[in-house]
Image (cartoon, rainbow, N blue to C red):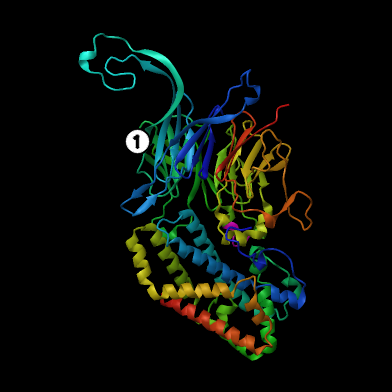
């Protein structure tokens, strides 16, 4: 069907939701989807400025999308923090969605509920009450963390986040502007090791967060399994690593 | 055959030009109706083929400039010859296409086959005479308009004075005079001082059909269409911005990308303007900027697939649109070699397919339907079985008759309304 014969993404369409727990396992959380979209966009942008003469319109559209996600992640952090306290129980009914990313963001903007997040926090709260509430309260003291994952794992401020995104966007546009091979090499040499690490990290993340498999979600939604907790922790470490790279570069 | 990148009828509709990715232009001419071949009326046959642009190498930036023809625009016919403008990413050329059906014979200084005669053999003086010959169609480049665009040219449009034309790239629009190749006026420049702040690019531009010096429109990737006017050649001001306020209930991460306008066309009457974005076609009344007067959904069933279409880059496909002669019907392309027509008065829309299997000569095209609900009826196509490699980006409608040209990758299809 598609150009590269990719498997259809889970959140893209067909309903196979039975509801309740089976349903929860099959739906990636909104944040995960958003993160995946962000990663995809960044990879596209980097592939873009590896071309000698990138398509300016396409690059601008992708960059605008990246900015939009980043802004929402910044806002979302605040929204989610406020709502963790107030909404204890997430309604399972609100979980039925297969194309969360393409849905109304009014649901999210109102701050009422983010389905995946709701389940996530609920599970963690019930089984890891201590840990999650601790980390959440730690996160609440941080100004405006991007999403729950950010809350738990990242200690950097949103200003730094913004700075990192802005910096990578700046680099990309500088390359678009100066299309000589020299500047492209300069760009690469500047972020040499971290670039390759980021690349492998992103590739790693992409395969981890493949919606068709939804493996990573199963680790989140079955917290009684201690093995899945350790999976969770290794994912945390990976993302920690990425954050370090972003900060350094 | 190469991938067709642009299709354009001339002002009378007798000629149809196509440009392709290999820099070639192929011109088709409509056969005249003759008593001996009554069925040949409306058939288009190849009239002329020439290489318009060659790949170039920009040594300064170390990049190759593609020879792909981005746009062709005809000039109105003023004498026996035909003129058209064709452009690739960087250079616009004015081509003259002329017929030659006579040949001079009886030269004094050269033989019939062109060899020079020995001077001492010339014993008498004669006047060469014109003899008929097989029709030969020649294309010759008359002007080359180069070095005026840093970014990729996406549009050219001839002014209604037929003496000037505009060329638009991602960030700038220039005005040229057809006779002057070494100078152009920059009339729109949206390049920010700091390229890092770039959020908007120009995606298409067109002159109004008859308001000389008054209006042209440029569209942007951020879903707005700007109308410009100028009072002197150098003074160009923004006169209106056509933009529909976003519907907050349908906002998603892809909202901006799908609102990016890929084409703009004024109606023949000059009263309306049509913009094409990824999922819809909108008709605007030039007197009303805040919302379109009509909106037509081209392939709304793709809205739930936007994420996949973003991943495989199809979401960046630039579809064109066109009006029929009386401005009563509009047409645009879609995927799976489907193209859509919308009748404005009756609100009837049709989906047709341009493919070899469904297009036998003289056969009537069967309307197609995409199944959007769970139950697929016979002959319907499900969204999942659509072929996204088969996209119809370029279509053209004859200026006065119901003849349409549809470019499906590297094939050109011509369809005509059945005359009973």
Position of residue A78 measured from the top left corner of the image (x, y, whole percent): 58, 75
Residue most extreme to the left: B120
In the rendered view, does B221 fall on the left or right side of A225? Answer: left
Question: Residue at the spot x=71%, y=42% of the render?
Answer: B349
- The chain to which mark 1 is attached is B
> x and y percent of residue B236 in the render?
43, 40
Pick whichever, B239 or A154, lies toward us. A154
Q: Residue at x 56, y 39 (%)?
A: B265
Q: Which of the two residues, B390 or B234, is positioned nearer the viewer here?
A: B390
Q: Is B100 placed above or below B257 here? A: above
| Residue placed most toward the observer, B142 or A78 | B142
Circle 1 sits in a helix, a strand or a loop, which is it? Answer: loop
Which residue is at 46% across, 54% downward?
Answer: A55
Categorize mark 1 by other alpha carbons within 10 Å: few (<14), some (14-19), many (20+): some
Q: Is residue B255 magenta?
A: yes
Q: Is residue B368 above or below residue A89?
A: above
Above or below: residue B12 compared with residue B356: above
The residue pinned by badge 1 equals B181
Q: Main secondary structure of the magenta part?
A: loop
Taking the magenta stretch, the answer to whether it contains residue A3 is no
Q: Quadrant of the C terminus of chain B?
A: top right
State the image quarter where residue A73 is shown: bottom right
Magenta-colored span:
B251-256
């Amino acid at each position: 069907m598609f150009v590269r014969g990719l498997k259809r993404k889970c959140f893209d369409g067909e309903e196979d939701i039975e509801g309740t727990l089976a349903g929860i396992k099959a739906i990636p959380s909104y944040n995960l989807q958003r993160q995946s979209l962000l990663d995809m966009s960044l990879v596209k942008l980097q592939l873009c400025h590896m071309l000698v003469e990138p398509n300016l319109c396409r690059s601008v559209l992708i960059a605008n999308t990246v900015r939009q996600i980043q802004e929402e992640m910044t806002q979302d952090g605040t929204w989610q923090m406020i709502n963790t306290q107030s909404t204890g129980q997430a309604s399972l009914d609100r979980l039925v969605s297969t194309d969360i990313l393409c849905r109304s963001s009014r649901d999210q903007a109102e701050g009422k509920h983010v389905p995946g997040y709701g389940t996530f926090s609920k599970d963690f709260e019930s089984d890891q009450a201590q840990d999650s509430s601790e980390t959440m309260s730690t996160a609440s003291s941080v100004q405006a963390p991007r999403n729950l994952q950010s809350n738990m794992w990242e200690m950097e401020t949103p200003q730094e986040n913004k700075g990192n995104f802005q910096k990578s966007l700046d680099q990309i546009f500088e390359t678009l502007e100066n299309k000589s091979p020299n500047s492209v090499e300069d760009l690469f040499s500047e972020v040499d090791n971290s670039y390759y690490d980021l690349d492998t990290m992103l590739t790693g993340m992409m395969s981890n967060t493949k919606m068709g498999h939804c493996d990573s979600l199963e680790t989140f939604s079955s917290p009684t399994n201690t093995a899945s907790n350790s999976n969770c922790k290794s994912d945390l470490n990976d993302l920690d690593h990425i954050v370090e790279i972003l900060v350094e570069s | 055959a190469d991938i067709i990148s642009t299709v354009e009828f001339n002002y009378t509709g007798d000629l149809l030009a196509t440009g392709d990715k290999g820099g070639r232009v192929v011109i088709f001419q409509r056969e005249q109706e003759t008593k001996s071949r009554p069925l040949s009326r409306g058939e288009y046959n190849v009239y002329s083929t020439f290489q318009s642009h060659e790949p170039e190498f920009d040594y300064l930036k170390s990049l190759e400039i593609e020879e792909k023809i981005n746009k062709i625009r005809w000039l109105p016919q003023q004498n026996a010859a035909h003129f058209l403008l064709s452009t690739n990413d960087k250079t616009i050329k004015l081509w003259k296409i002329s017929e030659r059906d006579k040949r001079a014979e009886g030269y004094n200084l050269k033989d019939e086959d062109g060899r020079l005669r020995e001077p001492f053999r010339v014993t008498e003086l004669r006047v060469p005479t014109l003899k008929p010959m097989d029709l030969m169609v020649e294309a010759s480049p008359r002007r080359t308009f180069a070095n005026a665009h840093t970014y990729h040219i996406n549009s050219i449009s001839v002014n209604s004075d037929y003496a000037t034309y505009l060329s638009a790239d991602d960030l700038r629009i220039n005005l040229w005079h057809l006779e002057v190749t070494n100078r152009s006026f920059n009339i729109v420049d949206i390049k920010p001082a700091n390229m890092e702040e770039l959020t908007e690019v120009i995606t298409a531009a067109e002159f109004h059909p008859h308001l000389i010096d008054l209006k042209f429109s440029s569209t942007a990737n951020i879903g707005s269409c700007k109308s410009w006017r100028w009072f002197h050649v150098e003074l160009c001001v923004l006169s209106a911005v056509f933009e529909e306020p976003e519907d907050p209930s349908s906002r998603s991460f892809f909202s901006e990308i799908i609102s990016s306008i890929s084409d703009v066309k004024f109606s023949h009457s000059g009263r309306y303007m049509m913009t094409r974005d990824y999922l819809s076609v909108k008709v605007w009344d030039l007197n009303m900027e805040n919302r379109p007067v009509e909106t037509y959904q081209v392939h709304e069933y793709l809205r739930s697939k936007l994420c996949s279409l973003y991943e495989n880059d199809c979401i960046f496909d630039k579809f064109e649109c066109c009006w029929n002669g009386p401005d009563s019907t509009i047409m645009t392309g879609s995927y799976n070699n489907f193209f859509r027509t919308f009748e404005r008065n009756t609100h009837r829309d049709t989906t047709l397919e341009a493919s070899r299997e469904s297009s036998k000569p003289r056969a009537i095209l069967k309307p197609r339907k995409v199944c959007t609900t769970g139950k697929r009826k016979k002959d319907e196509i499900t969204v999942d079985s659509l072929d996204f490699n088969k996209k119809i980006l370029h279509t053209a409608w004859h200026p006065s008759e119901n003849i349409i040209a549809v470019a499906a990758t590297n094939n050109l299809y011509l369809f005509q309304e059945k005359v009973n």
